[in-house]
Image (tube, helix red, strand yellow):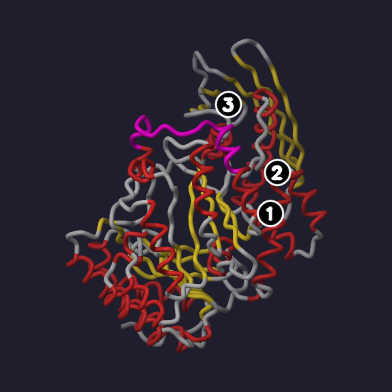
Amino acid sequence: MYLTIKGLDDERFIRPLELIANLFFEETTISFKKEENRDLIIQFSLDINGNTVYVKGKLLDQAGNEESAEYEKELSGYQTEKEQFKQVKNAVSHAFLTMLQNWTGMIQKWGILTGVRPTKLMHRKMQEKISFESAHKQLKEEYLITDEKLKLMQQIVERQLAVVPDLYELRNEVSIYIGIPFCPTKCAYCTFPAYAINGRQGSVDSFLGGLHYEMRQVGRWLKTHNIKVTTVYFGGGTPTSITAEEMDMLYEEMYTSFPDVSTIREITVEAGRPDTITKEKLDVLKKWKIDRISINPQSHIQETLKAIGRHHTVEETVEKFHLARSMGMKNINMDLIIGLPGEGIPEFTHTLNETEKLLPESLTVHTLSFKRASEMTKNKEKYKVADRQEISLMMEQAEEWTKAHDYHPYYLYRQKNILGNLENVGYSLKGQESIYNIMIMEEQQTIIGLGCGASSKLVDPKSGKITRFANPKDPKTYNENYESYTNEKINMLSELFNVKTTFAN
């Protein structure tokens, strides 16, 4: 779909308008230049008068059909030109979305939102002491979010505040993410830093040496400045790809280096690939009192697993789930993905039926996203996926299934290029929610990333401003530079928490 935009000359509008257009069409191209054979021409009139922005838009297609929209918004609360432009951009997106919805007949349930964390908007209203009723009205008017999604946002925010009542008071604590960048194989949809572990033992050894160094140094800084740890999450990759002995030393390092580990609210280890789980590794988890893990089937269709590059069997998922349960794992999460290649409603129904036999404590339902760097995106013609309507029906099916089995939504995030413009939702039985998932999504505190590909998200305890710092994604670069990355991160943390760095090595 080719669109010409008239009346705007700021290049910063192109990307947000493309994101909105991509909600309706495949492969949208937007240009400010007048070109022949454009599918749509959109003429904007933009007037900023004092603290008010007025947007008027007119859409014209090749057949001569027209749609128009206008939107007026008061600009408030901004301190910089960038913040002001964000509000202007949203006003233009509001008029643009309205015209496209009227022209196509398609309603976008998330309105103009294309960002990852919509529930943050609802939390912001709660922190401003605004009632849910007023929050719904304001968010619906400003972002065109439907009542259905507003209700989901409210459910999630209420659940999060029940699970973490002091959520808004945790900025002086931190959570820690530890990234293990190895997997048995690389999945076709994956863009995480994950490298096939076979034949890489030298690289693994070097990486773990660097990771232990990071853990010691950051732990020392936390102890020096009396900063508590709320949660720890071992992710990746697949943290259970390394050996039981390596896992044992890693958790021993955590208990030795981090402050007051016995008071940490939650420690989670992703054991997502069933083919990495053994009795010996579960013994290690039990030894260190870790009982929250993930075992991720993604699908219970064997042909699908083969197509996406997962080398475990459906039977192995079930077997390892029962093994983990028998060895005292009391809080098991499972991930399912809607829209995997070759799957429609019958296949997803089968996966839900098989999940019913296991009933894990929590279930994360993902909608497939075509991530730019994934194998699946590079070879789209090989991977046929369901259409928008069937994807939406599968999501509704997941909502009905989880409700029938007493699971409640407790966190949500969205991705660009997500099928059906839907979302990923974490469900859990009451009392079994992942606190780390809440912390990473709602960005209420600093999360320190350790290990290869780990990203630190530094949240200013006073202003809430977020600064990011990323470790390198490939093990070789990480292994060569982990000391400098660690020192730089500690200096940033010291500045953030307004304390003096008392050591550098």
User: Is residue 24 visible in this depiction of the protein?
Assistant: yes
**Sequence-first tag of 3 and 1:** 3
| Residue 114 lies within the magenta run | no
**What are the residue bounds of the magenta stretch?**
378-395
**Sequence-first tag of 1 and 2:** 2
Neighbours of disc 1 within 10 Å: few (<14), some (14-19), many (20+): many
Label tally: 3
The residue pinned by badge 2 equals 145
Q: Quadrant of residue 276?
A: bottom left
The residue pinned by badge 1 equals 153
Query: In the image, residue 386 lies at what x, y percent?
Result: 49, 33
Q: Secondary structure at mark 1?
A: helix
Q: Vertical placement of 98 versus 226: above or below?
A: above
Q: CA distance from mark 2 to mark 3?
A: 24 Å
Q: Are marks 3 and 1 in contact (CB under 8 Å)?
A: no
Q: Are marks 1 and 2 in contact (CB under 8 Å)?
A: yes
Neighbours of disc 2 within 10 Å: few (<14), some (14-19), many (20+): many
* Tag shown at residue 5: 3
Q: Quadrant of residue 179?
A: bottom left
Residue at point 38% right, 87% down?
Answer: 256
Taking depth in this image into account, of 422 and 137 the one nearest to the observer is: 422
Q: Amino acid at mark 3?
A: Ile
Q: Vertical placement of 232 versus 260: above or below?
A: above
Residue at point 65% right, 75% down?
Answer: 169
Taking depth in this image into account, of 330 and 268 the one nearest to the observer is: 330
| Residue 380 lies within the magenta run | yes
